[in-house]
Amino acid sequence: MGNMNQTNPARGNSTRQANKALRKQKILDEARNLIATRGFEAFTLSELATRAGVSIPTIHNLFGKKQEVFEALCSEMVVRVDQTVSNPDLVDPIEAAEAFIDNLLALYRSDEAFYRAAFLAGDRSGLFEHQLPSGIFNRSLSIARQMCQDAVDNGY
């Protein structure tokens, strides 16, 4: 008979992965709060580590350098924005445009500190460069173009 006190290796790995995800989210939450409350210039890995209750090497292992923390913060913002604005299945172009704007405003109001911090980080990291095909400017333009095309296709 096997030892009943042995732990399942798959379960242990699952727990480690969950703890890693929680640490990553805690670090991102503290990065957001630090940038939003004290400004972009106050953001250092040392201050972030202290606030998140982890070591600087832990931040390096989970994200990399300061730039990668910014990119993760911005990526989280882009995912939230994409999820919010990609839903209007409205035929009327005016209703679709209003829903688009209302959804963005509601999203921003839901966590102003997060979006303020992410926009600051995104601006510093070049996320808003108009030339970047994957940047927010071009993504928003693409959504607007699609809304206009849908309006034309539906006789507006």
Image (spheres, rainbow, N blue to C red):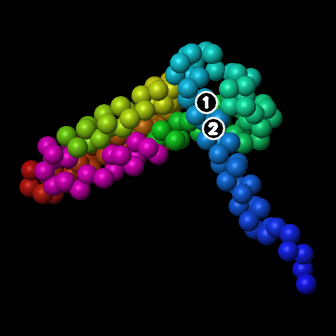
> In the structure shown, which secondary structural element does the residue marked by tag 2 occupy?
helix
Residue type marked 2:
Lys
- Residue behind mark 2: 26
Give the x, y percent position of residue 23.
68, 42
Residue 18 higher or lower than 54, as above or below: below
> In the structure shown, which secondary structural element does the residue marked by tag 1 occupy?
helix
**Residues under numbered marks 2 and 1 in contact, where contact means CB atoms less than 8 Å apart:** yes
Q: Is there any visible trace of residue 45 in the rendered image? A: no
Residue positioned 53% across, 18% down in the render: 37
Magenta segment's dominant SS is: helix
Residue 38 higher or lower than 126, as above or below: above
Residue 1 higher or lower than 133, as above or below: below
Residue type marked 1:
Glu
Does residue 81 show up magenta in the picture?
Answer: yes
- Residue behind mark 1: 30
Instruction: Check the image and name the residue furthest to the left.
Output: 155
Give the x, y percent position of residue 149.
21, 51
Residue closer to the observer: 37 or 104: 37
How far apart, in angstroms, are the residues tagged by discs 2 and 1? 6 Å
Residue positioned 48% across, 31% down in the render: 114
